[in-house]
Image (spheres, helix red, strand yellow):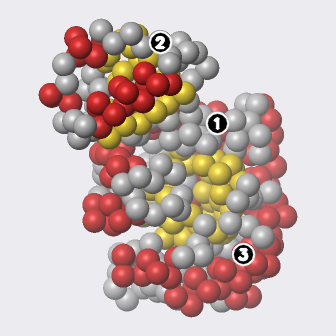
Amino acid sequence: MIIVLKQNPSQEKVEQLSAALRDLGLTLHFSQGVSTSLIGLVGDTSRINIDMIEANEIVESVKRVSEPYKAANRKFHPQDTVVNVNGCKIGEGFLSVIAGPCSVESEEQIIEVAKAVKASGAKFLRGGAFKPRTSPYAFQGLHGEGIKLLLKAKKEVHMPIVTELMSLNHLDLFSDVDVIQVGARNMQNFEMLKELGHSNKPILLKRGLANTIEEFLMSAEYIMAGGNENVILCERGIRTFEPSTRNTLDLSAVPMLKHLSHLPVVIDPSHATGIPWMVKPLSKAAISAGADALMIEVHNNPACALCDGAQSLTPEAFDDVMNAVKAQAKFENKII
């Protein structure tokens, strides 16, 4: 439910109304626009007397929200959310690029890639310390040692780092990580999402391989319901009948998510297709569709990569993609 307030309401009256609503066991979300102020109500609103609320002198109208996600809903928060990570912004008017290898393999490798992607214009360094793999015999990452190497690279190049959390048992290792990634396989790990809701760190939430947009937003809601509003949505391709690409990149998800939610949206063209030459055109298309950021895999020697080398760009290829991305961002009036 949303309460739309009249212009310039008395702060004392707002506080009185808020106190009465909290007494009903409701959680309140305030949104201040240029000309409109909203109070979003989360909880059991069945006990609310709408006529009584509308009779309040500071209330313009009361609207029910039919969607099951509330905090992530644009109706609750009409302005776009901008997630600020150490001065690097993801959201309204900004375009950030997150780049790095699928997995951290050595200190030399991660620092070399970090320097290369920063030189090309990337704002965030990504790298997997814990790797979910289909085969139990495949390389699973360096775990805690991988995070230590990421932190060394962060200190070397002064870039925020993004890495995936696989289990709450490892959460203590992520204390110095700037953005925690929740992978596609954990999108509906609700216990993990609830715990991350108590964190103050930005969470990059990837859409599951076969999940609807509503299910995706409900997973974001789990995090936000705990009080953490720094959620970044990532479309990384969904599983379809098409075998020519690794997954099918759902570019239509970008404008739909931007329409339904105020949260920033990232596109991951590397995982979506598994084909390096497709990264450039899909990155440009994603920017035109309204994406706030891109996540691109880069490896200094893809042929020898321990994980997903076939879909990784070389630093030279990434630099070429970044030139195209910068031109497209300028055309779309985005700051990069």
Is 315 located above or below residue 213 in the figure?
A: below
Q: Position of residue 327 (x, y in %)?
A: 80, 40
Residue at (57%, 23%) from the top-left corner?
33
Q: Is residue 244 left or right of residue 222?
A: right
Quarter assignment of residue 250 = top left
Instruction: Name the quarter where the N terminus is drawn.
Output: top left
Per the image, label 1 sits on a secondary structure element best described as loop
Image disc number at residue 92: 1
Q: Which residue is mark 3?
A: 154
Q: Is residue 131 left or right of residue 32?
A: left
Q: Position of residue 44 (x, y in %)?
A: 19, 36
Q: Amino acid at mark 1?
A: Glu
Q: Nearer the viewer, residue 322 or 274?
A: 322
Cα–Cα span, label 3 and label 1: 26 Å
Q: Nearer the viewer, residue 154 or 281?
A: 154
Mark 1: give few (<14), some (14-19) or many (20+) Cα within 10 Å: some
Mark 3: give few (<14), some (14-19) or many (20+) Cα within 10 Å: many
Q: In the rendered image, is residue 260 in sight?
A: no
Q: Position of residue 203 (x, y in %)?
A: 49, 58
For marks 3 and 2, the one nearer the N-term is 2
Count of numbered circles on the image: 3
Cα–Cα span, label 2 and label 1: 26 Å
For marks 2 and 1, the one nearer the N-term is 2
Q: Which residue is mark 2?
A: 6
